[in-house]
Amino acid sequence: MTRGVWVMFFLLAMGAGGALQAQEHGGSEAFSSRVVRVALLQDYNTRVVMAGTVMLGATSGLVGVFMLLRRRSLLGDVVGHASLPGIMIAFLVMETISAGSGKWLPGLLIGAMASGFLGVLCVTWLKRNTRIKEDATMAIVLSVFFGGGIALMTAVQKSPSGNAAGLNSFVFGSAAAMTAADVQIIGLGALGAMALCLLLFKELTVLCFDEEFAAARGWPTHTLDLALMLLIVSISVIGIQSVGLILVVAILILPSSAARFWTDDLRHMAWIAVGFGGASAYFGVLISALFPRLAAGAVIVLAGSVLFAFSMVFGARRGVLRRWRIHRRLTRQVGRHDLLRTVFELWEQSGQPPGTPLAGYPIETKALLSARTWSPAVLHRWIKAAAKEGLIATDGSAARQLTALGAREAKRVVRNHRLWEVYLITYADIAPSHVDRSADAIEHILDCELLEELETLLQKQYPEMEVPPSPHEIENQ
């Protein structure tokens, strides 16, 4: 079903775009043939851009996992903005040394990395040596560096040399302009970052989850933290060419955040993030190749946003749909427990002779409504759900009664509730008049081990008693 939704979405996008393309070019080229050519990567430029961006996206997903778990999500944004003055300074230096070589990509990336790493060091120093909070330090460093970069870029663009044209593409990205040499540089950087990340996978995992434990074991936590920052800086810098320094943080955060909805296992999360990062780049480049007026960097980020939104809703571990189902199931369970406990308490208060079975006890709607603050509609819903599970027998009339299964479940629920009440009174020093509400908050999630512990602790107080008596006077709730 999921694959079908994706195919339908992609076909609709291509169909709508195809109509626009046909109108614009006057039908000179059939859109279907263009789709085939792009899908099969027949164009050399598409293959080049695809290779570079997919490697970058996959590595960004892996590094972004540790960036997310380390709570350094905004650090990529700082690096992206802080790298702008480094790019401009590197251009000026190379242009001064040798006229016409100012836009040599390796030199520009070295300048961007130096400036970005300096920005990270400034954030770290301000956080450790001042009382300014981390988010404020990031905002300060980001603003100062980016402002300086814009000032330098304005000066560079007004220089008499005509070689400065195109440097503003680093702000918004220009994936379509990548050459094979650029892809080699990006690929080497991405593979190096991925290799370092995999080599330090265990150490970075411990650093993200328990830094104090790592320090106690003698691990160089400060060095590991710097290594993680270096990875973030590297990916942010080599990603500038594809998506630009403004959007570079998105390729780090979106894949890892989307993967977080699917699993709690870090290894699985890392591989899912790698897949999401590569898929975002793949679909982004395909759509950009089909519609040349759409910037590849922006489309890559939008593709990652679609994957994030899909994961947020349908994620197998933390998705909104799964959490809604769990909440709905827990709400039904709480309502069923409250209904059975109320029936049991009414049976206790009815003055039945000793030995009278709970099964078959008639359930009166009026008595239940007076005992609880339920509306008739809510009570009808709980009774209907209990009858569906075989806890309450009903013949369609107003007469209802507990079944044998319902009686056993009611005794179990009341016993758990009162065991927890007695425990709270005895060990938590909660007044009997308030203990019922406190027990309501926890009784529905008691597991077998905790119940055995409660039974052991309270066995002396209520020996051989199936259901302990209520430690407080039962009142209408």
Image (cartoon, rainbow, N blue to C red):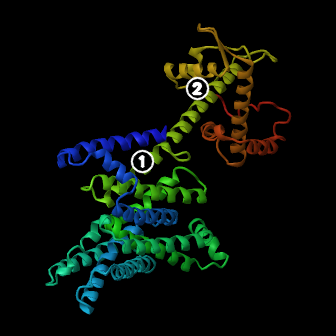
Percent across and percent down for residue 323 are: 52, 41
Provide the secondary structure element on which disc 1 rests. helix
Percent across and percent down for residue 121 are: 42, 80
Compared with 296, 366 (above or below) is above
Compared with 366, 312 (above or below) is below
Q: Quadrant of residue 468?
A: top right
- Describe residue 330's horizontal placement relative to residue 141 as left or right: right
Residue that mark 1 sits on: 309
Provide the secondary structure element on which disc 2 rests. loop
Residues under numbered marks 1 and 2 in contact, where contact means CB atoms less than 8 Å apart: no
Q: Amino acid at mark 1?
A: Ala
Q: Residue at x 43, y 57 (%)?
A: 254
Quarter occupied by the C terminus: top right
Q: Residue at x 40, y 49 (%)?
A: 306
Q: Nearer the viewer, residue 77 or 178?
A: 178
Label 1 to label 2: alpha-carbon separation: 45 Å
Dot 1 or dot 2: first in sequence order is 1
Compared with 256, 358 (above or below) is above
Label 1 crowd bin: few (<14), some (14–19), many (20+), radius 10 Å = some
Q: Nearer the viewer, residue 439 or 194?
A: 194
Residue that mark 2 sits on: 476
Q: Quadrant of residue 234?
A: bottom left
Q: Residue at x 73, y 30 (%)?
A: 412
